[in-house]
Image (cartoon, coloured by chain):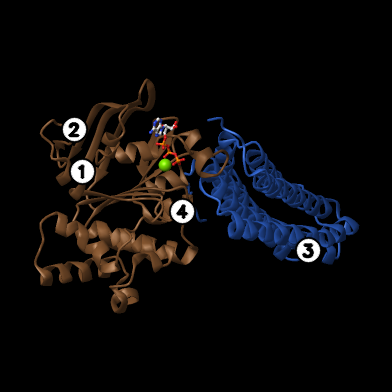
Amino acid sequence: MQYKMQAKNLNLYYGSKQALYNISLNVPTNKVVALIGPSGCGKSTFLKTLNRMNDLIESVHIDGDIFLDGNDIYAPDTDIVYLRKRVGMVFQRPNPFPMSIYENIAYGPRVHGLKNKNKLNEVVEKSLRSAALWDEVKDRLTDSAMGMSGGQQQRLCIARVLAVEPEVILMDEPCSALDPISTMKIEELVAELKKNYTIVMVTHNMQQAARVSDYTAFFLNGKLVEHDITDVIFTNPADKQTEDYISGRFG
Amino acid sequence: MENQVTRKAYIEDLARIQEKIVEMGIAAETAAKNSIKALLTFDKKLAAQVMESDDIIDKLLIEIEDSCILLIAKQQPIAHDLRVIATSFKISTDLERIGDHAFDIAKITYNLKKAFDFQDSHIKALADCAISMINMSIKAYKNADVNLAEKVCIEDDNADSLFAKTLTEISNQTSINTMPEFVFTSRYLERIGDHATNIAEWVIYLETAERIRKTKKI
Ligand SMILES: Nc1ncnc2c1ncn2[C@@H]1O[C@H](COP(=O)(O)OP(=O)(O)OP(=O)(O)O)[C@@H](O)[C@H]1O
Ligand SMILES: [Mg+2]
């Protein structure tokens, strides 16, 4: 099996407080990996180590390795802007920029040097189509993104990530602020996107993890308790703690 | 973070379904036991009682199915919980069939013109074997006892060989009068053993997530 990303013996500290303990986890190429676990167990912290979002926090200290296509992303010569282009992130709450729908999408490619108007138009359309949003917004691309529904805004944020042509997409509870229909649209989108991208998704919704992911990793108190094929985790997990968590015995 | 127990009502509902399965198991075992007793002692009153009590088993089946369907709709059970639900459907069906066979045996007794002689037949041994298989499979279910469930599966070979012996005896019989009753009764008992084996296999699946299927045919 080919691994797009790999974490090896990863420890992470916020100041003196350790938040991740010796995490080793492989992310296979073109698969969806779901991260589950109770609040505060370290899911978001781990997710953010995959594109070095934690660098933004002063007190964070990391040891261990994270590889992207076999290269250590914490190596000193890593180009962090380029890394975050390759490993994009979608957050819990949709966070469109206060500008037009079109400009939201065109922003990233422009930053990365794309100036040609026709090319930009193409990228905007392609990204919105990939995010299953094009038909809903094609006639109002110049409208403010702030006037969209929550579900549309989240798909806009996904389109925004797609516009810079990433290889890996990190999603931190992308549906937690959405209604069931929008949630289903995002889930269908994820199933579609994994043909071309590798996806790591944090979710609190067990059924969602069961539906959309190929692999599931269960975190507890900063430790990776168990990770396996999703079908196995949800039918016959090896660890009692996993079983108790997924079946709602605690959380 | 402390691991506080959640979903109390759900866990209670699951436990209640399992209790109902045991209750149904005891009812089916009692029916089978009494149907044989009625036959061997030519007790038509007891036979009638077995036939009447079949409604109780059927009613339990409906209750179990309804509770399972409701829990699936409302709680999305997974892992062991899901296997509780899945096996409840299967086991309750097997128990209902055991109840039906007890009913059938009771009906034979009810319609018999005169007592017939089992002295030299293996039918009593077959009945004891089948009834103990029900008993063990229910006990295995109740106590999540995989070893005991495996014993039931093994015991099924014994039931099969006793069944074969009764068939031989029947073909050697001179009295034509009671032959059909003999054949049917031993057939029902053999089927009861099969259902008990199914239950035992589901107990193994419930507790280990492993599918056991002892393919056998006479
Ligand atoms: N910036 C920070 N500074 C200090 N501690 C932090 C910081 N961010 C997170 N933590 C701590 O690290 C631990 C893991 O937090 P994290 O946000 O990764 O959990 P989570 O699994 O994503 O939880 P949730 O499901 O609630 O989002 C928690 O104990 C949290 O308090
Ligand atoms: Mg989080």
Marks 2 & 1, CB-CB < 8 Å contact = no
Q: Nearer the viewer, residue A117 or A52?
A: A117
User: Secondary structure beneath disc 3?
Assistant: helix
Look at the image and give the colour of chain A. Answer: brown
Q: Using the image as rendered, state which of residue A242 and residue B95 is in the foreground.
A: A242
Query: Disc 2 versus disc 3: distance between alpha carbons?
Result: 81 Å
Measured as percent of width and height from the top left, residue B173 is found at 69, 58
Which of the marked residues, 1 or 4, is nearer the chain's N terminus? Answer: 1
Give the Cα separation between the discs numbered 1 and 4: 28 Å
Q: Amino acid at mark 4?
A: Ser
Instruction: Identify residue type, mark 1.
Output: Tyr
Q: Drawn colour of chain B?
A: blue
Name the quadrant of the N terminus of chain A.
Answer: top left
The residue that disc 4 covers is A176
Tell which tag, 2 or 1, sits nearer the viewer: 2
Q: Is residue A171 left or right of residue A85?
A: right
Which residue corresponds to mark 2? A74
Q: Relative to B25, does residue B3 appear above or below in the rendering?
A: above
Image quarter for ligand 1 equals top left
Report the residue marked by disc 3: B108
